[in-house]
Amino acid sequence: MYVYKMENVIMFVLIIFSFIFISQGVKHGRNLIWSMSPTSLGVSRIVGIEGDPNDWVKTGNVTVRHISAPHYGWQFRALGFHYTTKSIFWSEKSYKRIQELTLDGSTATRSLFTKTSGYVDGLVIDWISDNMYFSDSKYNWIIMVPLNSTDVFYKLIITTGLYQPHGLAIYPKKGYLFWSDWGDIPKIEMSDLTGGNRRILVSENIVHPRGITVDYDANAIYWVDSSKDTVETVEFNGNNRRIVLSLPNTNFFGIALYEKFIFMTEQEEGHLKIYDKITGKGYTNYKLGYIPFAIMMYDEDMQAGELSCKLSS
């Protein structure tokens, strides 16, 4: 099904720099990618800044490409990727499905799962075993779906003790799955990749955790709390929790990591915020003109490791 169109060159001014929207869509290669929807008229987009953040954060010289939804009804939400297959994945709220697009110039999409709710805000890919995981906060479950199955096959791996599951993060090499839950009992949890060996990492002084991501080098996770207006981190064993930064009057949604940088989407003013993951120092702040949702660092170095979890029917 051919559903995507690539827009002509557009320039619009952000808080600090200019973004140049190029007529071609997001390309395979190192990109910071996020989803966003218009505040009024316009179409939902998936947007990517090309290149190494160590270069473009410092200089402000950015190349931005985007993919536009085919019509006004669509809304991109969660994002995931598989670098080896050059694929990005998203949840789409209006038609309640999860789709895949290969970044090879094609505009053909593949639907991997249909009949979700409109509230799939967590999506990750196990790039070693080729499984997709997603959370659905209406049905309060986490599902695993094999990417290469020719059958309609999936497994509900977490179905109890979820109240409003939101963000997902994964570490296939160690066999870990992490998620945030902002329901009646807000918390950060983890399990193995089949939903077993489940345990709570954070359950105190947490209100509305949303996006979550893994720091593979530090054996830690980072998450945003949209009620506390904080970015926080904790190690896999539950130790050394700390607040990285606190920004009053924000509404954080998504978070991504790359080396020393943390990237957050913020919905109150429609910002992309970039900070230092250790010191909390602010680097730059972009006004997007849209409401941003999920964000991810599409990069080969983010997906390495050995066999994790194969799912068979």
Image: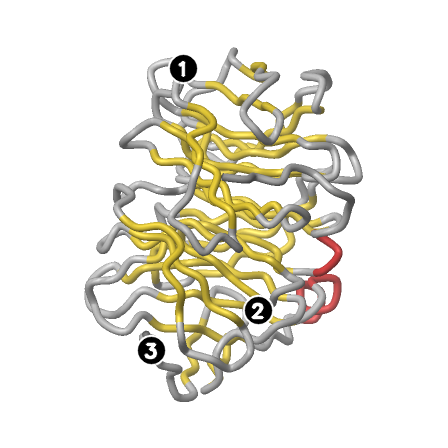
Amino acid marked by disc 3? Tyr
| In this view, the mark in front (3 or 2) | 3
C-alpha separation, residue under disc 3 versus residue under disc 1: 40 Å
Residue shown at 39% from the left, 17% from the top: 160
**In the visual, does 13 lie left or right of 61?**
left
| In this view, the mark in front (3 or 1) | 3
Q: What element carries label 2?
A: strand
C-alpha separation, residue under disc 3 versus residue under disc 2: 24 Å
Q: Where is residue 310 in the image (x, y as percent from the top left)?
A: 62, 40
| Residue toward you, 13 or 170 | 170
Q: Circle 3: is it few (<14), some (14-19), or many (20+) Cα within 10 Å?
A: few
Q: Earlier in the sequence, mark 3 or mark 1?
A: 3
Residue shown at 35% from the left, 73% from the top: 68
Residue shown at 53% from the left, 47% from the top: 264
Q: In which quarter of the image is the N terminus?
A: bottom left
Q: What element carries label 1?
A: loop
Q: Circle 2: is it few (<14), some (14-19), or many (20+) Cα within 10 Å?
A: many
| In this view, the mark in front (2 or 1) | 1
> Residue beneath label 3, please?
2
Q: Where is residue 98 in the image (x, y as percent from the top left)?
A: 37, 53
Q: Can residue 210 be seen in this view?
A: yes
Amino acid marked by disc 1? Gly
| Residue toward you, 82 or 19 | 82
C-alpha separation, residue under disc 2 versus residue under disc 1: 38 Å
> Residue beneath label 2, please?
49
Q: Is residue 296 placed above or below 175 in the rendered structure?
A: below
